[in-house]
Image (tube, coloured by chain):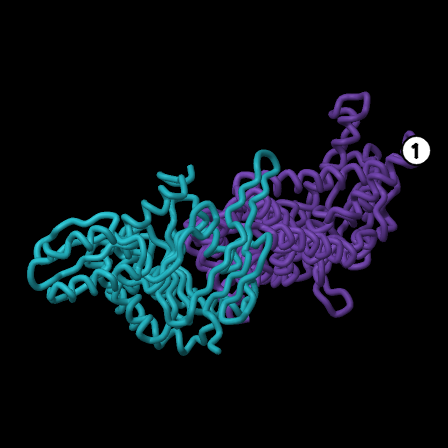
Chain colours: A purple, B cyan
Amino acid sequence: MRSFLAMIRNSFYEAVDNKIFVVLVGFSLLFTVLILLIGFEELPFEETVRGIFRNVEAHFKPVARFGSAPASETGGSPPELLDVSKVERDGKTWYRAEFTVKDPEKFRLKVPPLPGMPEWGASYEGEGGIMACLQFESRMAGFFQVRTGSMGDGRYFLEAKPGKTFETAGAQQITILFGVWKIPLRGVTSMQLVFGIESMLAKFIGGWIGVIVAIIVTSWFVPEMMAKGTIDLLLSKPVARVNIIASKYVGGLLFVFLNASVLVGGTWFAFSLKSGFWHAGYLGSVLTITLLFAVLYSVSVLAAVLWRNSILCIAASILFWVLCFLVNLANSFVNRMSGMFTEAPDWLRTGVKVIYRILPSTSDIGDLSDYFMSLGTPPVGMSAETNAKMFEKIDFAGSIVQACVFIAVMLLASYVVFRRKDF
Amino acid sequence: METAALNIENLTKTYKAWLGPQIQALKELNLKVDPGQIFGLLGPNGAGKTTLVKTLLGIVAPTGGAAEIFGVPIGRPAARRRTGYLPEDHRFPGYLTAAATLDFYGALSGMPRSERKAKIDAALDSVGLLKWKKVKTRKYSKGMKQRLGIAQAIFHDPDLVFLDEPTDGVDPVGRKAIREIILDLNRRGRTVFINSHLLSEVEMICHRVVILHAGEVLREGTIQELTRSEGEYVFCVRGDPGPCMGGIKALCTAVSGIDGGFKASLPREEDVDAIVDLLRKSGIGIRSITPVKVSLEEMFIKVLEEDGAKGGRP
């Protein structure tokens, strides 16, 4: 155990010694500092309603764009705000907006179906359509209690109970560099913005660019250890070869875990502090980034003991990632083919299924980030049930087990090769 | 009976290539090293010296035979727990300081943290690196790395130390210091196994030597045994041996006069007694009879020439 821990500590020193580690940590800290320079300020309700109306306007345009007549003839005008006030309802303060719509008969809205949202999957036209659209957009803006109605003479009203400021789209503006630059949030809540940026950091920066950089940086860990003069010293010590391989692997994971922790932890803290949206689900992406890397690094380790060449390690890991992506794509395609235009042949379905089951599902690991992100705080405008339904078809536990089994097989194969190797 | 520090029986190593010929690096090698000896392993390039050491340390797997280190079969961690090793062209992690290097390899050797902490300064001091303790090894010269390598090999106080070219890249002062370290280890009862090309150094400090060529043992013995020129003796006498030189020449294959005596080549060892008798009968006093010695280097070359392998195996 002592020697195993010493090996892990040494792997960590090796990683930290690398300038790329410093660059990556610096990059993450820079992100964090930049976020700390951002502020969120509340806007008046009027601005929020204007934001909602602007979104309603957007629903006219697709009709015009895809219709046969020019936009000016078939497209409707956006609602025009007349007055904004506060009203008391059930002992609570609600906002009330009064507005007119010039040509409501031109409004047509076709909402795609979405599980758990009964008003979706239908077509709306005219006044009823506008009301439904306003209800929908208000919900998207974070108002979960909304009333709409007609006042006659082409006048309508919208009443909404305000939620927390970060739940109200268009209710805030971002200030940068302590107010030097102000950007109003249009049609998006600060929560959505934070959610979106965190999602991008977790899936794109961390889960894609970060993992590729980590594969490159850690690719020489094992080949370097197996270089003449280094491996002789290690193997001459009373340390089992399985410990040497395992500790190098764990050292690589530690490197990525630390980097991901600094990036995700730092940005999470900065966003939470500035927006008041303490979104703990985002922290789960540290684990998904590490798990995705763990899968790819196990391939890198096997390549390293086979060829002792870091370039080949990088190539093997990236190609494997691409292979997983293609298999996932093929699996989705074969499944969708059924009932669409033609039935996929049995041999193809079985073949793809078998490969899909053998290889770790890297796309499921990516979706796991989304799942963690939505835990406790479903994306705005979506109920917890709807959110849960989005992920119910993904067998996360199965994917994690599949990934762990794959890692174990790769490491076992690496050990078998390493154990039989003369140096 | 004391357990041998090293006991090798029919040890064989054949490197198998996917394509091309097999290379038999060790051919049924037999060797025994007693505890407390400084043992020298000599041989031309490609003789199998490094393969032998690596096989004993479990770095290379043998294809046949067996070997034990203090009674423990090689390949087991327990065998390596009692050994220290300085590989040729070793590479330390450049990101570690000298102190961290010793700490790391000490931990791998099973030393508790407290013991490592307590011994690091003394170990570095013994190889003259104490003032470089906190400097990363990537900044070290070759000689410094070599000295740190020796410190690493003996840091955990092993019973058997394998040193592969221990003085390689070290200046004469450093070499002397390394010789002192080796002799000190020996004084403390440790066994040292040296693999070196510097025959003069081996001659200076080794008790026993083995010459390996093409994976086989050509010669083995003490330095005295190996460097003695067979059948050649120098007789230092009082007086003129001239009157009995006729009888002496009849016993010898060759005789040559030297200052204060003569040098005789004898076909048989008992002929020494016959010459002594002749000298005594003639009333000539005998000061000394010394077997003629050759240097280890001369012997080494001669042995290889005899084996038809001058210049070593390519």
Q: Quadrant of residue A90?
A: bottom right
Q: Quadrant of residue B186?
A: bottom left
> In this rendering, is residue B229 above or below B311?
below
| Residue B72 appears left or right of A341 | left
| Residue A258 appears left or right of A280 | left
**Considering the image in quadrants, where does the N terminus of chain A appear?**
bottom right
Residue A279 can be seen in this image: yes
Q: Nearer the viewer, residue A65 or B312?
A: B312
> In this rendering, is residue B37 above or below A267?
below
Name the subunit of mark 1: A
> In this rendering, is residue B298 above or below A398?
above
| Residue B258 appears left or right of B181 | left
| Residue type (three-letter) at the residue carrying disc 1 | Glu
Q: Residue at x 47, y 60 (%)?
A: B31
**Residue labelled with disc 1:** A343
> In this rendering, is residue A399 above or below A186?
below
Where is residue B110 drawn, in percent x and y? 48, 72
Q: Residue at x 75, y 42 (%)?
A: A100
Where is residue A393 drawn, in percent x and y? 83, 52
